[in-house]
Amino acid sequence: MNCELLYILGPCAAESREQVLETARELAAISCQPSEVSSQHSVPFIFRAGAWKPRTSPRTFQGIGEEALTWLAEAKMLYGMDVATEVATPEHVRKAIAAGMDYLWIGARTSANPMAVENLTPALSSREGGKIKGILIKNPVNEDAKLWIGNIERLEKTGIPVMAVHRGCGHQPCWRMAHQVRLARPDIPMLLDPSHMSGDAAKVPELMQMIPQLGLDGAMVEVHCHPAEALSDAKQQITPEELADLTQPHPGRVLRPSTGRSIEQSSSPLKGGSHGIELNWLRAEIDELDDKLWDTIAARMDVSRRIGEWKKANGVAPLQPERYEMIRERLKNLTPTLSSGEGELRTEFKLALWELIHEESLRQQS
Ligand code: PEP
Ligand code: MN
């Protein structure tokens, strides 16, 4: 395992004492030996499991609740690992602290509500809250860099080290949002959550490669001893063995799990020695936009084909000159301005691109 990055590993949810302890034991076996780590911690990763699960449907597994915290505490005692769970209410915070959790994370659904985050801060700021080594804030479910930054600021008031977890929006990476936060707060460690970002265990390896490319500080990965049997997020969880293959050493930032702060921040996109990291962020953004562009074009072709069927059924020719002219006029007046504020798309470019799309549409219709 690459001991230079911070990993938060474990199942989506704590389901049973056996499942928690089996996953923790297998993870402990594949992690760095204590001598490899420069911190006082015996294992270089934080073990995670959700006790309370914020789920879309009330008819699905909602988590075991408080009892699950005792299993996490047992894993901590047996394997010397720091443990983390998700909190969404002040009561969760108090119970998690009382049960000996070292780190807490705030999920994407809670992060979408600034008041919910604010409501957690008194419990975190309390004397008891001082026992927490770090608080992780996921990005809000919908793309909102400003709210994510706002939540970081809300949590900073507690005095507990704050880290950001980039889990994407739905199953889209939303690199632009993460890039904005990285640029605004290069001092805040950012971890990647490839599990929720993709929702697909098969896509986790590829996403993990983004960590060194983007100079991220580590990852939160859902790892389950028997993923197929998981009660939540079964499709995206990987086994401890698969995780071991993905965490080979590569140059990255050194993180001290005890503080969550980077020791060496030279790979920050704003600072020197970024080795093309800023370019990689921009490329991640552009690749994602290209993906969306092709999805949009494909969706357009689908509609076009349906129009073709209608025309055929109603004896209408594929090319309608009137309609053709109308679309061209509409396009000329359409002014998608560049967000940099530097001009707009040239009319010639818009028409040439649309001409190509239209030609393909006609081909699909005939
Ligand atoms: C989780 O980490 O299990 C979780 C619920 O994640 P998110 O809030 O990112 O959906
Ligand atoms: Mn999950």
Image: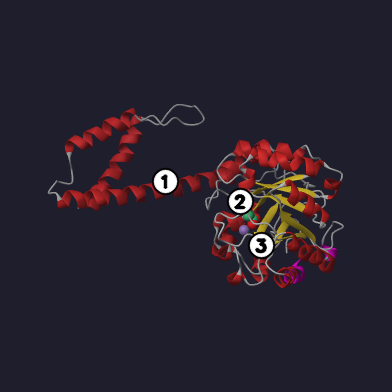
In this figure, which residue is indicated by the disc labeled 1? 293
Is residue 23 in sight in this rendering?
A: yes
Left or right: 16 as drawn, with respect to 296: right
Mark nearest the camera among 1 and 2 is 2
- Which is nearer the N-term, disc 1 or disc 2? 2
> Does the Cβ of the disc 2 residue fall within 8 Å of ligand 1?
yes
Q: Is residue 173 above or below residue 184?
A: below
Q: What residue type is labelled 3?
A: Ala
Q: Main secondary structure of the magenta part?
A: helix
Q: What residue type is labelled 1?
A: Leu
Q: Are marks 1 and 2 in contact (CB under 8 Å)?
A: no
At a point 79% along the width and 56% down the height, the residue shown is 101
In this figure, which residue is indicated by the disc labeled 2? 167
Number of numbered discs visible in the structure rendering: 3
Q: Are marks 3 and 1 in contact (CB under 8 Å)?
A: no
Query: How far from the left and from the top, in percent, is residue 315?
Result: 12, 49
Is residue 6 in sight in this rendering?
A: no
* Quarter of the rendered image showing ligand 2: bottom right
10 Å crowding of disc 3: few (<14), some (14-19), many (20+)? many
